[in-house]
Amino acid sequence: MDMTLRWYGRKFDTVTLKQIRQIPGVTGVISTLYDSVPGEAWETDKILALKNEIEDAGLKLLGIESVNIHDAIKVGSPDREQYIDNYITTLERLGQADIHMVCYNFMPVFDWTRTELARVRPDGSTVLAYTQEAVDKLNPEDMFASIEADSNGSILPGWEPERMAKIKDLFAMYKDVDDEKLFANLKYFLERIMPVCDKYDINMAIHPDDPAWSVFGLPRIIINKENILRMMKMVDNPHNGVTFCSGSYGTNLENDLPDMIRSLKGRIHFAHVRNLKFNTPTDFEESAHLSSDGSFDMYEIMLALYDIGFNGPIRPDHGRMIWDEVAMPGYGLYDRALGAAYLNGLWEAIVKSHR
Ligand SMILES: [Mn+2]
């Protein structure tokens, strides 16, 4: 297991590689070419510049989060071929740069969805939060405006202004896409990319939909054990794997997280581990990582990862905003550093108790 932090690159992140390097037990980062556009082939020069910068700081680039999927691939329109070819080129170049894990998601229109980016908790920290009742009252355009107003001036992944400018067109594109069609388009995409993944030993790690149910009537498929096992089976190749994100699967309280982890043995290539605190079944907030602060048993989650022999990169996920830090919501330094230290502590105790 390699403890990492997500890093958006020097131009976009308030956290520096030097700071990440000083978190005990963190040996790598997960990064991306944050100014790339979904559908384009990444340039080798840019990949190597990113990798070198990270290595010069004494860290490893242990994977990419994310190489985003163009909407043509998700809806299965005829021009998808060109975008899949570009995706394959990107994977080839990543493989040649000795990068072997790629996180991606297959969510229509919206990436992750929250209704508040700075809900104040009793201790004065602020956190991302979600209330279904608020979503039910909003139309998608207003959702974007409220996210933008709340984002401390940063551009949030999946909520880029260029993308949101064409939100009506995006909804129109997905009008005939239901769950079955989305599954079929995902299968088509995976079958096309598996040969290059096999050649360069690249583990594809699909991120779950967040929250793990349909939002604004759009189909969402990567939401529970049944669907994810269906996906593993439909393209039965070890390089077709998952990002196990406890905070995303955990949005649905019917998901038994340790059980899901055990059922995915050999197919979890990346782990996001964080806690949520549920106030009602449809209202949750992103608490501190500790079990005692939220609704999940973090020890059981880490134990399940240990039991299946998980040895990929792992990262704390969204952190609270604490100690007056100003950063991209969820991606400050302090609370994620506390999260990494806590997860490392759990892991050490699990490893030693199994000797
Ligand atoms: Mn996640």
Image: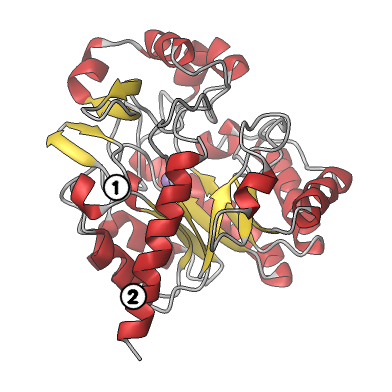
Q: Mark 1 points at which residue?
A: 275
Q: In this view of the protein, which residue sits in the foreground, 190 or 45?
A: 45
**Do labels 1 and 2 touch, CB within 8 Å?**
no
Which mark is nearer the camera, 1 or 2? 2
Mark 1 neighbour density, 10 Å: few (under 14) some (14–19) many (20 or more): many
Query: Is residue 260 visible in this depiction of the protein?
Result: no
**Residue 34 occupies quadrant:** top right
User: Going by the picture, which residue comes out furthest to the left?
Assistant: 280
Q: What residue type is labelled 1?
A: Asn
Q: N-terminal of the two: label 1 or label 2?
A: 1
The span from disc 1 to disc 2 (Cα, nearest Å) is: 19 Å
**Drawn side of residue 149 relative to residue 92, left or right:** left
Q: In which quarter of the image is the C terminus?
A: bottom left
Q: At 34% from the left edge and 75% from the top edge, which residue is drawn?
A: 349
**Drawn side of residue 71 relative to residue 115, left or right:** right
Q: At 48% from the left edge and 70% from the top edge, which residue is drawn?
A: 236
Mark 2 neighbour density, 10 Å: few (under 14) some (14–19) many (20 or more): few
Query: Is residue 197 visible in this depiction of the protein?
Result: yes
Location of residue 21 in the rendering, given as x and y in whole percent from the top left corner: 64, 54
